[in-house]
Image (cartoon, rainbow, N blue to C red):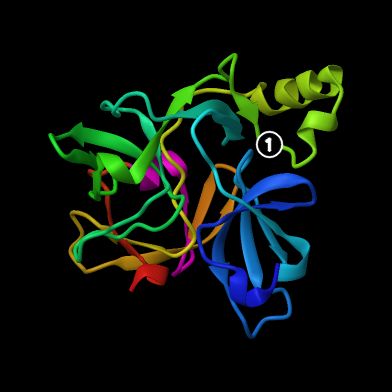
Amino acid sequence: MKLYQVRKGQFVYYNNELHRIYSVKPLYKQSVHLIRLRDLTQHLTTAARVERYKPKSLDSFVFNRQLFTLCNHRKAEEGDYILITNPRPDSLDYYSLNEIEVVSTVENNGVVTTKLNGIRHSEYLLMVPGRKEDSHSIDYQDGENMLSKDLSTFESDQLETNHLNPEMPNIGDVYKKNNSDILIKTMVISIHGETIFLGGDIKLSKEELTDTSKWKFLYNIQDK
């Protein structure tokens, strides 16, 4: 791809594996900043080394060591994961293309996520746990050319620690600490496995940061 074609949120293949672009820094030599979906590790590269993929219904992939299949045959319910493929945020919402969020409540016209974003039903694809029989695996760019044994080994490796976790924060997410005598606002600057690093030398587990009694998500800096 050319740099002018690269956008935050796009799904792309890099080194044959599925990633999501979380930031584009045109002035940097490695201007495209990626999150590998299967394990949420960060990678830096150039636009020339990525190839875009547009997710669709019945695509299946590993996200944070969990298998999901995208579908559009039913609306999301509380606790479901959704992939925002058609973002139309209102002025008070902070989300962008291909963000993955967890549904907190369901309303007539849409859902409210754990990040307090209101998302219309027409804006997302539901992420159903598991790889459905008629689904199309998109984990590898050349996955269709892989032997079944290789694919089975790949899935076994990714899912060996599979358990349902709260959603992973994104680089650039800004949080405010609740119940503090002084105002503490800080941003996610790095993610290593289950550990989240924030500005001000704050290091937390994913469970601590997503505990709404302790921290409140405000917005992502890229959306300001």
- The x and y percentages for residue 200 are 44, 70
- The x and y percentages for residue 203 are 49, 55
Residue 46 appears in the picture as rendered: no
The residue under label 1 is which amino acid type? Answer: Asp
Q: Is residue 94 above or below residue 199?
A: above
Q: Is residue 124 above or below residue 92?
A: above
Q: Which residue is mark 1?
A: 139
Horizontal side, residue 15 vs residue 90: left or right: right
Q: Quadrant of residue 5?
A: bottom right
Q: Which residues are magenta?
A: 198-210
Quarter of the image with the N terminus in it: bottom right
Taking the spot 41% from the left edge, 35% from the top edge, the residue there is 166
Q: Quadrant of residue 206?
A: top left
**207 in the magenta segment:** yes
Element assignment for label 1: loop
Taking the spot 18% from the left edge, 54% from the top edge, the residue there is 179
Residue farthest along the left direction in this orientation: 108
Residue farthest along the top direction in this orientation: 133
